Image (cartoon, rainbow, N blue to C red):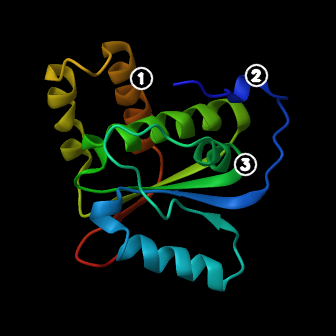
């Protein structure tokens, strides 16, 4: 995976949009995340979200990396299957990096999931021989970092 890192750019970020939405498509794309996206849009808040989703084994397109880097805020919708997705975890690692390097504000939303449930998929990532352990450790660090930020806990339809 070759991506330009925020550290290779100027330390002064140029925000081109307000919000990047990170979510697991099969969990929340047509429900909560769609409603959130439209609510932000109605308030004229420029929001980037992936509308397509990746097929298994596909690389994350450069436009998605750029969308993360150019957004002042990242809202991460942590759902039941979020941490089982290598794509979501790669995206989350990039978001955590942009938080540290560019000062991006990250807001987690726990969508019908407890923090403790988020670590369960890592046993599978570790057993799965195709996942590089160094990368798995970066995913774990990024998830821990973001999950420990102030955010919202959505249970039974309420924040």
Spatial CA span between label 2 and label 1: 19 Å
Q: Residue at x 69, y 52 (%)?
A: 71
Image disc number at residue 138:
1
| Mark in the foreground, 2 or 1 | 2
Residue 8 disc label: 2
Which residue is identified by label 3? 70
Please tell me whether mark 2 sits on a helix, a strand or a loop: helix
- Residue 86: image x %, image y %? 34, 37
Task: Judge whether 28 appears above or below 105 on screen.
Answer: below
**What percent of the width, then of the height, locates residue 99?**
62, 38
- Percent position (x, y) of residue 127? 14, 21
- Residue beneath the point at 72% across and 79% down: 44
For numbered disc 3, what is the local secondary structure?
A: loop
Mark 2–mark 3 distance (CA, rounded to whole Å) = 14 Å
- Structural distance between the alpha carbons of marks 1 and 3: 22 Å
Residue 110: x and y, percent?
34, 58
Most foreground residue, 14 or 99: 14
- In this rendering, the answer to whether 35 lies above or below 59 is below
Above or below — where is 96 with respect to 37? above
């Amino acid at each position: 995976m070759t991506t330009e890192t925020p550290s290779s750019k100027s330390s002064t970020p140029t925000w081109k949009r307000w919000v990047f939405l990170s979510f697991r498509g099969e969990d929340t794309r047509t429900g909560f995340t769609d409603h959130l996206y439209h609510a932000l849009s109605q308030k004229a808040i420029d929001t980037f979200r992936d509308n397509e989703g990746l097929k298994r084994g596909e690389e994350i397109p450069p436009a998605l990396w750029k969308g993360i880097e150019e957004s002042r805020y990242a809202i991460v919708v942590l759902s039941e299957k979020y941490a089982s997705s290598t794509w979501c975890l790669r995206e989350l690692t990039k978001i955590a990096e942009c938080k540290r390097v560019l000062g991006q504000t990250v807001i987690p939303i726990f969508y019908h999931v407890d923090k403790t449930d988020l670590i369960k998929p890592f046993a599978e990532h570790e057993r799965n021989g195709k996942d590089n352990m160094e990368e798995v450790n970066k995913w774990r660090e990024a998830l821990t970092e973001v999950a420990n930020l102030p955010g919202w806990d959505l249970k039974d339809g309420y924040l």
